Image (cartoon, rainbow, N blue to C red):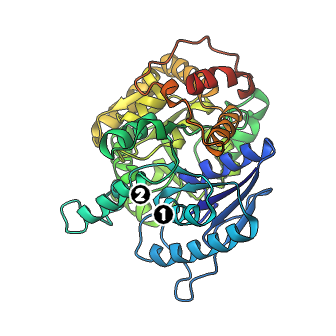
Amino acid sequence: MRVLMIAPTSFFNDYGCHVRILEEARALQSLGIQVKIVTYYKGRDPAGLDIIRTPPLPWRSHYEVGSSRHKIAFDLYLAATSLVTALRWRPHLLHAHLHEGALIGVVLRALLRVPLIFDFQGSLTGEMIDHRFLNPDGPWYPLMRRLEVWLDQQPDLILTSTIHGARLLIHAFGVSPDRVIPFPDAVNVEVFRPPFPEEIPALQRLRETWGIPPERRLVVYLGLLAPYQGTDLLLKAAARVVRIQPHVHFLIMGFPGETNYRAQAATLGISDHITFTGKVPYEQAPLYLRLGELAVAPKMSATEGSGKLLNYMATGLPVVAFDTPVSREFMGEEGYYARWGDADSLAEQILYALRHTEESAERGRRLRTRAMVYYSWKAAGKILLDIYTFVQQGACFPARALRLSQKRPRVKEPSRRTSGAGSRSLIEKRTLG
C-alpha cells in the first residue's frame, strides 16, 4: 500500500504534531507500508523517511511557528507539490495532517478517487485564536468557522489525537460519529523510559554541562515556548516555587522566544533557578527528560492534543498540568492538576508534588504503566494499518467500539522493563472492540 501524507508544516521540527507524523510514518513503514511525506521546504530529514519538499518562497526565507498570513503562499506551493507527487506516484490513500492538509487532500481525492483520512489535532479556529491570529469577536471569525465546519465534513474518516477531540467534532462541528475515530497520540515506550542505574553518571555529567547545581531538585518542561503553551504562567509559578523552596531548579527545553523568556525570568528574579536549553533534538529528548524529578505541562489550549504528556508519562515522571480534558484523558487520576490558567495553583501543585516524594514517585510509576498499556506506538501502528484497510475497502470502521464515554479498565502494572509490544491486545480491545 502506498500512502501520501500531506504535512502543512516545516517537518521535521522537534515539537508537537511533527512527532506524531514522524512516529506514524515509522510505525507504518515497519509494517511494510510505503509512505511519502509532502511538506514545506524547511525542516530536518529524519533517517529512513521519504520526504518531498516544496520549493522555497522567493520573498520568504523563514516563517513562524503557528498561524501566519504567509502560510497561504506556503500552502499553495504545498498543494502544487502534492498534486505533482500524487500524479507521479499514484498513492492508494491520502493521509492529511492539519486543516490545510485536509483542504489539499479534498482536492486530490476528487482527482485521484482514493480515500482521504484527516488527522485532526485541534480546531482550526481554536488554534488561530490561541495564536492570536483570529479575533473570536471579529468579522472574519464566522467565515472561518463555516469553512472549518465544511472541511470537517469532507474526509472519508477523521482521526483525532484525543477522545475530547472526537467529541468536539461530533457535537460542535456536526460530523457523523461513524466517520470519527479517536486515535490518540502515542509514545515509543522503549525510548522514553526511566533511567537505568548505569546511566546515572552520564546524567550527572549532563547536569554539569548545563551548570545545574547538584543539590537542586529538577522540574522539567519540554515543548514550544509561547503564551498558549502556558510558558508565561510557568515562569510566574516558578518564581513562587523557588521563593518557598530555593533548592528547586527548572529546566525549560524548547523554542522559540528563549531570549524573551530569559528576560522575563530575570525580571522575576529567578534567572539562577532556570536553565533554558533552546531547541532539544527529538533524539535527545528522552535523555534530557531522565534528568527530571517532576515534569510540568501548563498548556492552555482547550482543543489541541498534548503529546508531551505521553513523553513525560513513559519516562516515569510525575506530572503537574492544568486541568483540561486532554490532560485528564491521558493521565486520569494519576496527574497533579492545577486550576486552568492559574499560576498560583500551578505553583501549589508543584510544591505539593515535591514535598510528597513517595506519592509522586508512585504516580510516576503508574503513569508509565498507563503509557505502556494504552499509548504504545508499536501497537498503534497496527491499529492504523487496520483503519487504512477498512477505509480502502470502503467498509465502515467499527467506531462504536471506541465508546467515546468509556471508562478505562483497571490493569496490573507491568515491570519497568516491559516494552510496548505486549500491550497490543489491550489497545486493540480499546480501539477495535
| Marks 1/2: CA–CA distance | 7 Å
Which residue is pictured at 68% across the width and 33% down the height?
Answer: 189
Sequence order check: which comes first, mark 1 or mark 2? 1
Q: Are marks 1 and 2 in contact (CB under 8 Å)?
A: yes
Q: Residue at x 25, y 68 (%)?
A: 140
For mark 1, give the secondary structure: helix
Query: Which residue is labeled 2 in the image?
Result: 151
Mark 1 crowd level (few <14, some 14–19, many ≥20, 10 Å Cα): many
Quarter location, residue 432: top right
Q: Is residue 109 left or right of residue 419?
A: left
The residue pinned by badge 1 equals: 103
Towards the viewer: 183 or 70: 183
Answer whether residue 231 is visible to the viewer in this image: no
> Which residue is rendered at x = 41% and y = 71% of the image?
68
Residue 165 image offset from top left, x and y in percent: 42, 41
Three-letter residue code for mark 1: Leu
In the visual, does 376 lie left or right of 136? Answer: right
Q: Position of residue 309 (x, y in %)?
A: 52, 37
Residue 99 at x, y percent in the picture: 46, 58
In the rendered view, would you say 330 is above or below 21? Answer: above
Kindly identify the amino acid type of the residue bearing the numbered disc 2.
Answer: Leu
The percent coordinates of residue 372 (x first, y second) are 64, 26
Q: 10 Å neighbourhood of mark 2: few (<14), some, or many (≥20)?
A: some
